[in-house]
Amino acid sequence: MSTTIEIGGESSAVAKGKAPLIGVSNYTSSYEKKGGYKKGIAIFDFIMRLGGVISALSAAAIVGTSDETLPFFTQFFQFEAGYDDFPTFQFFVIAMGLVAGYLVLSLPFSVVGIIRPHALGIRLFLLISDTIALTLNTAAGAAAAAVVYLAHNGNQSANWLAVCQQFGDFCQNVSGGVVASFASVVVFVVLVVVSAVALRKQ
């Protein structure tokens, strides 16, 4: 007479098999949450770029179309002010046009970031490019702001008159363009911060 003791090998194997499945499930859930976070950042990035395109194009268009002629009794003596009379404003229009063009070209890369939120190369490329564009945008806006300040207030030490007393509409337009350019500066600052945060979370 023999006594046989059966060991529940199958149940232990099943038990052993369940533990890895639980771990994989937890990892997948964490990965999906992280991917959703990255995708949200990418969507916000795309929206900010659209806002930057609008502000940069507005700045270039406002200053580029600024023109005013003072009325006089005779047409042989006229004083006219246009953006092309100031090299600083010429640089401003060109620079803001380049910034707007870059933002338009960066939109497809931002879309790729939405589709592939974990792509490190795209985010790094946008961070570097945004920093360069931010530098150009800030330089153009600051230079134009200095000229606008002199146009409004003049400089008694250098005997520079405040021309905005005569060319009020022209000064008002270029001032609006400068404000729009600094709005795009804010957009770029936000984009750089967002990209840095996204890279840090990788």
Image: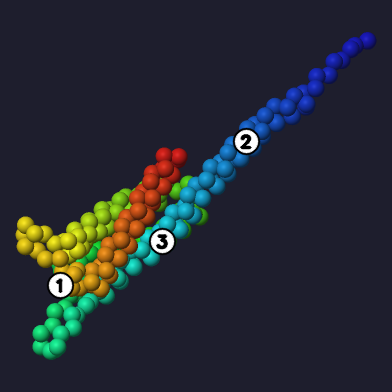
Q: Is residue 150 above or below residue 17?
A: below
Q: Secondary structure at mark 2?
A: helix
- Of callouts 2 and 1, which one flags the residue occurring earlier in the amino acid sequence? 2
Can you tell which of label 3 and label 2 is closer to the viewer? 3
Q: Looking at the figure, which quarter contains the C terminus?
A: top left
Between the C-alphas of marks 3 and 2, the distance is 38 Å
What kind of residue is marked 2?
Asn
In the image, 25: left or right of 143? right
Would residue 129 be seen by someone viewing this image from the given angle?
no
Of 173 and 72, which appears nearest the observer? 72
Q: How many marks?
A: 3
Q: Identify the residue at horizontal 15%, vertical 85% (top origin).
A: 72
- Of callouts 3 and 2, which one flags the residue occurring earlier in the amino acid sequence? 2
Mark 2 neighbour density, 10 Å: few (under 14) some (14–19) many (20 or more): few
Residue 85 disc label: 1
Between the C-alphas of marks 1 and 3, the distance is 30 Å
Q: Identify the residue at horizontal 55%, vertical 47% (top origin).
A: 36
Q: Label 2 belongs to which residue?
A: 26
What kind of residue is marked 3?
Gly
